[in-house]
Amino acid sequence: MRVLVTGAAGFIGYHVCAALLARGIEVVGIDDVNAYYDVRLKRARLARLTGAFVFHQLDIADHAAVARLGDGVEVVVHLAAQAGVRYSLEQPFAYAASNLTGHLSVLELVRHHKRIEHLIYASSSSVYGTGSALPYTEDARADQPSSLYAATKRADELMSRSYTHLFGLKQTGLRFFTVYGPWGRPDMAYFGFAEAIMAGRPVTLYDAGRLKRDFTYIDDIVAGILGVFDHPPGDDAPHRLFNIGNSRSEYVTDLVRLLEDGLGFRAETVDCPKPEADPVETWADVSALGALCGYAPATRLDVGVGHFVAWYLEWRAMRAVAG
């Protein structure tokens, strides 16, 4: 079996590739390895993917290049995107190219390669905006995005739905909730907090630390993706959307405390008003995904942060040696 994974050098993409390879599945990876964050981290992830793994460095917005990679592929796991909510205020066209044109490139690939049976693609909890009732359920309103990033991810869902209607594509969209863990993204809060604590810089907490997030450990995310992989859509519901989170909401201050304990240093904190695009709280109802495949996130925040800290200290030491 051959699976195409976009965003293979990314945080979630790397872990999904590793899990598929562990199953003995042939994986074709795509990533443009851009400089949005440290390219050394992306290269280090790729270097760990061995065996039946073939990598192509290309931009998914290049639809002709993407189209050439469909031969023999049976499933596509589309995780490539320009991430980050606040960065979309600085580089909006990067989001249009990667998240909109790139998603369309993948849809066209699947449309024209009839052997591809299932497209699994990444959406985001940000599609719910800032005013949805908690916990978020898949049938909640998702038509009032509070950032360009959120708007692009909701647009991806709508494009996918239209391609299912027009061409019968079988697809599953996954709305990710605050994923964290080893080999994570430096632009994410937990990673940035760790960097600031170790460097003696202040940690910025919004609204005196009252924000809450549904922090989801990477192994639980991968388990959910594999669950969807093992339970493809039927003809009765060819396009599906699922929340994939930890199903609990926890204070950002608890995350900082666990990082302090693991790193062995206290954080200096600075209070700032919450950015307009950020919700006060996120919390995923994952019952639908649980009913489909038994998804049941099991990693407590203290355990997951401990795993991240152990990896982070190793990665930090490697960077220091490499200069």
Image (spheres, rainbow, N blue to C red):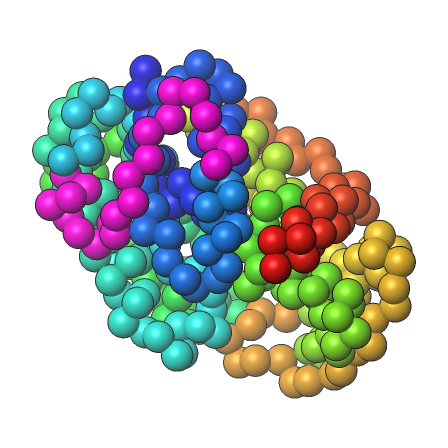
Residues 103 and 64: in front is 64
Residue 227: x %, y % from top left: 49, 26
Q: On the image, which quarter does residue 221 sit in?
A: top right
Q: Which residues are magenta?
A: 47-67
Residue 158: x %, y % from top left: 27, 53
Indicate left or right for 238 with 179 as reference: left
Q: At 84% from the left edge and 60% from the top edge, which residue is drawn?
A: 260
Residue 299 in view: yes
Residue 146: x %, y % from top left: 44, 73
Indicate left or right for 64 with 303 as reference: left
Q: How many marks?
A: 0
Indicate left or right for 86 with 108 as reference: right
Per the image, is 119 magenta? no
- Quadrant where the C terminus sits is bottom right
Residue 288 in view: no
Residue 84: x %, y % from top left: 47, 65
- Quadrant where the N terminus sits is top left
Q: On the image, which quarter does residue 25 sit in?
A: top left
